[in-house]
Image: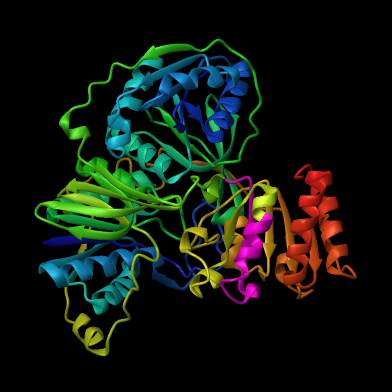
Amino acid sequence: MVAANILIYVDHENGQPKRTALEAATKARELTDSGGGKVAAVVLGPGAPAAAESLGRYGVDDVYVDENPAFEQYLTLPHIDAVAQAVEQSGAQIILFPDTPDGRDIASRLAARLDSGLVSAVVDLVPGDGSIEARETIFGGAYTTSVAVRDSRAAIFLIRPNAFKPTESPKQAAVHELSTTLGDRAMRARRGEKTQEEGAPTPLEEASIIVSGGRGLGGPEPFALLEDLARELGGVVGASRAAVDAGWIAYSHQVGQTGRTVKPQLYVAVGISGAVQHRAGMQTAETIVAINRDADATIFSLADLGVVGDLFKIVPALTDEVRRRKGA
Amino acid sequence: MNIVVCMKQVPDTTAKKELGPDFLLNRGDLEAVINPFDEYALEEGLRLKESQDGEVIVVTMGPASAEDTMRKALAMGADRGVLITDPALRGTDWLGTCKVLAAAITQLNPDLTLTGMESTDARSGLVPGGLSELLDVPLLTYAASVHVGEGTVTISRQITGGFQQVEAPLPSVVSVVKGANEPRYPSLKGIMAAKRKEIRKLGLSDLGLSPEGLGLAGTRTPVTAAAPRPEKSGGQVIKPESPEEAARQIADYLAANKFI
């Protein structure tokens, strides 16, 4: 058994922790319950203390907060100073970040500052020979490797969204103020004007359900059919490189080798043949459903359920069917 | 305005990547290309140079053969290249790579360092962050556009469902997203000119670095085991009579797995 104090970096919106934080808390609680140690969390920016209640519910013992608005006004640097401070105050040997764009920025700079080992794309953490080892997926899920961290002030892990299932394990989380002093050097990258779609869409990497379209859609308009289905299922829309390169949908939707790597609970591949390029981004999805009119499409070898047929008819019929059952 | 563009040589993206016995990517037989994400950084650098004057220097850490891919960057318009190559670097992890690149970039002292958003082989997107920390400069990531003003750089940062402006003083490290621009193809003239451009090869000692903490032996994150993904089994393929029947069967499956 391996005892370790674990610190979780919490992504949140006005004190409402993101699912990634609850997933990390669940795993951290499990590791400390069996091996010993405490689970701490660091929450930065306006509304931070409000996160303590739900974090406690998922097993966090100590919550370190700093409500300084600088965390919203400036990129990355203030966060490094604060997390480094939280590492000091909590005595953490392990730090967990979500493997998302902001998570990667903060974790990588912190690792360089602490001269510490960092493992990304982590899908599991297991007690190893005297320390916690990571399971990392590489080459788009073609391999899973076991990685140890040595010669480091702390072991830093970027956890892939949807790697763990949040499970409650109630604690009374104690709230601590962080004593971070942010100097001018922390406020060098100033955030300005934001233009964003309405209703803050879920990032592709964090979505638990993705409905993705490829070359078979034949143009931009049929993506509206996928959007309808995704909405009914509570998911988001993805795309293959072929569809993005054709200009049918924005690059931010691309799943694959040169797009995002995703690990949703459900991946619905529509009109996607299953080229290596695409598989590399989605083959670690829990459940894969594929709809394609070509019975020989390679995507079917990955699918838990493959459906041969006309997507233009099946997708709207499925949207209606899902809507009907939800209403029932 | 002097710009460094960090570039990595990677296997062609359609190649099947396999691990060797030491858990390193078996690069031997794979066709090598410029990391496709880095081409967007290079294009952005070339455009800035064309509008502001100055020099674009490509910096790569990799095997001696990376000279070939670097030559392509020179043909696209980069002015010169620095290739850090040393047998002791084989197996160096991302943080070690950052230390080596930072040592080379410190010597070049650029106003701006551009990188791709990640490499297509490691896909971790950690180098821009590590590099910026070691250079002690601001980090602006996922730039969909880059504008340089009087001593400052402003990017339009790609965020979920939109963009946010971020501004920092120079020097800075900026990572550029795919699709930020349309990377140019080398012209015939460019290809001819590239043959005469300088590629400086540096070893660790040229950078004043010792091999300690670098290479496979120096990694802080050793791989202890690797397992290829098992083939999927138990999947079924159905060919329903009608779209309605297909919809019913898919919905049954989704319901059985608690998705609806």
Q: How is the image coloured?
A: rainbow
Task: Tell which of B84 and A137 is nearer to you.
Answer: A137
Task: Tell which of A296 and B253 is nearer to you.
Answer: B253
Task: Name the quadrant containing residue B43.
Answer: bottom left
Q: Position of residue B27 (x, y in %)?
A: 47, 64
Q: Position of B155 compared to B24: left or right? A: left
Q: Position of B56 compared to A155: left or right? A: left
Q: Position of A279 compared to A257: left or right? A: right
Res. B84 in view: no
Q: Position of residue B4 (x, y in %)?
A: 20, 60
Q: Is residue B210 magenta?
A: no
At x 77%, y 57%, the residue is A320
Q: Quadrant of the N terminus of chain B?
A: bottom left
Q: Position of residue A14 (x, y in %)?
A: 44, 29
Name the residue at the bottom extreme: B188
Task: Tell which of B252 and A146 is nearer to you.
Answer: B252
Across the whole image, how many numbered discs are drawn on residues?
0
Q: Which residues are the magenta region?
A: A207-229
Q: Position of residue A321 (x, y in %)?
A: 81, 55
Q: In the rendered view, would you say B222 is above or below B2?
A: above
Q: In the rendered view, would you say A72 is above or below B236?
A: above
At x 21%, y 46%, the residue is B209
Task: Name the quadrant containing residue A82.
Answer: top left
Q: In the rendered view, would you say A120 is above or below A251?
A: above
Q: Quadrant of the C terminus of chain B?
A: top right
Res. B167 in view: yes
Task: Name the quadrant containing residue B146.
Answer: bottom left
Q: In the rendered view, would you say B147 is above or below B100?
A: below
